Amino acid sequence: MSRLNVWENAEPGVKRKIFTPGQTIMMMEVHFEEGAEGYLHSHVHEQFSYCMEGQLEFSVNGEKVVVSAGETIYIPSLAEHGCRALQKSKLLDTFTPLRQDLIDNKA
């Protein structure tokens, strides 16, 4: 199984690095090839995504929002969300509370 602070493949054309978490907050860097998708999903955690590079179209509870470099998007608890990279892109995702589903089984 993969480890914290190491790049891993997520979906096709998407790779991520989950950083060592704090007590109640965590971050993850995600890189997208142009056209790659972060599949629709939901979780109880609140999320902020900061676009470091590129441009992505997010779907949050069916509403489409385009986020470009230097912009953020807030994703509330239990919102169904996903995104598609309109260009090669990089995100910095922040979650609270900890996403145990992402950090469990990582050395």
Image (cartoon, rainbow, N blue to C red):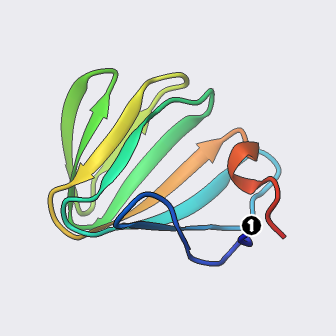
| Dot 1 alpha-carbon crowd within 10 angstroms: few under 14, some 14 to 19, many 20 or more | few
Residue 22: horizontal and vertical position, in percent?
78, 57
Q: How many marks?
A: 1
Choose between 46 and 1: the one closer to the eye: 1
Judging depth in this view, the residue of 5 and 21 nearest the camera is 5
Q: Residue 32's spot in the image, x, y percent?
A: 32, 66
Residue underneath mark 1 = 20
Identify the image quadrant of residue 7: bottom right
Q: Please state if 57 lies on the left or on the right of 23 as rendered.
A: left
Towards the viewer: 68 or 64 = 64
Q: Is residue 10 left or right of residue 59?
A: right
Q: Secondary structure at mark 1?
A: loop
Which residue lies at the image location 55% right of the left edge and 51% below the top edge?
Answer: 94
Viewer-side residue, 70 vs 14: 14
Q: Which residue: 55% across, 25% down?
A: 77
Q: Is residue 48 above or below residue 104?
A: above
Residue at point 19% right, 59% down?
Answer: 35
**Is 77 on the left or on the right of 98, as rendered?**
left
The quarter of the image holding the N terminus is bottom right
Q: Does residue 44 sit above or below 22 in this rendering?
A: above
Image: 54 above or below 93? below
What residue is at 38 percent from the left and 56 percent from the top?
50
Q: Residue furthest bottom?
A: 6
Quarter of the rendering containing residue 58: top left
In the rendered image, the quadrant that contains the C terminus is bottom right
Find residue 100 and report its horizontal and vertical position in percent: 76, 45
Q: Measuring from the top left, give residue 2's x and y in whole percent.
A: 71, 71
Q: Is residue 72 left or right of residue 97?
A: left
The amino acid pointed to by label 1 is Thr
